[in-house]
Amino acid sequence: MLIDDVLVQLQELTDIVGDLAELARGDRGPAAREPLRLDLLVADEVAVQNTHGRSKDVHFELQAAPCWVVGSDDGLRRAVGNLLDNARKWSPAGEPVSVECHEGTVVVRDHGPGIAEADLPHIFDRFYRSPAARGLPGSGLGLAIVAQVVKAEGGTIVAENDPLGGPG
């Protein structure tokens, strides 16, 4: 139906404007930082994704240990949410997404097709969309926001394919 198409496109435009605003805010300097339980923050974001993932039959499985970090709650939520959203987008229906959180580290593993070697150096660049992603919804800003938040928090981010090959 035409109304449904317009609503989907309006949501995509709203998401792009929000992403651009987030990137612009990140360029203004660090956000307020406070001690927070990263494992609880990640658990909240996993719960949100498990609700959204039902439409695609994707389930997020969390293994977490209590861990404290000093950081921006809003920024970290946005970064974790974007990571999980990206994993949901690339995960085949019925396959779980593994999320681990311990010692201030978050690891997300999906069972999607993997990242082409030529794309790996660019996936955190603003507006970068791999040829495989160009037919999917998105603006190429989600992972750029993740990288910006992680850098602002003094962390590091890495994307890699399963060293054993195949989906992972």
Image (spheres, grey):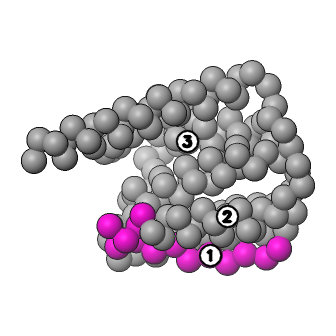
Residue 79 visible in rendering: yes
Which residue in the structure is indicated by mark 3?
Answer: 143
Instruction: Determine crowd level at label 1: few under 14, some 14-19, many 20+ residues with C-alpha closer than 10 A.
Output: some
Element class at badge 1: strand
Sequence order check, earlier mark of 2 and 1: 2
Whether pointer 2 and pointer 3 mark residues with C-beta atoms closer than 8 Å, the reply is: no
Element class at badge 3: helix
Distance of label 2 from label 1 (alpha carbons): 9 Å
Q: Is residue 84 magenta?
A: no
Image coords of residue 83 (percent x, y):
56, 53
Instruction: Determine crowd level at label 3: few under 14, some 14-19, many 20+ residues with C-alpha closer than 10 A.
Output: many
Instruction: Determine crowd level at label 2: few under 14, some 14-19, many 20+ residues with C-alpha closer than 10 A.
Output: many
117 left or right, relative to 36: left
Which residue in the structure is indicated by mark 2?
Answer: 42
Q: Which residue type does callout 2 highlight?
A: Val
Q: Is residue 58 magenta?
A: yes
Which residue in the structure is indicated by mark 1?
Answer: 62
Whether pointer 1 and pointer 3 mark residues with C-beta atoms closer than 8 Å, the reply is: no
Q: Which region of the structure is painted magenta?
A: 52-66
Q: Quadrant of residue 67?
A: bottom right
Element class at badge 2: helix
Depth check, mark 2 against mark 1: the one in front is 2
Residues 1 and 30: in front is: 1
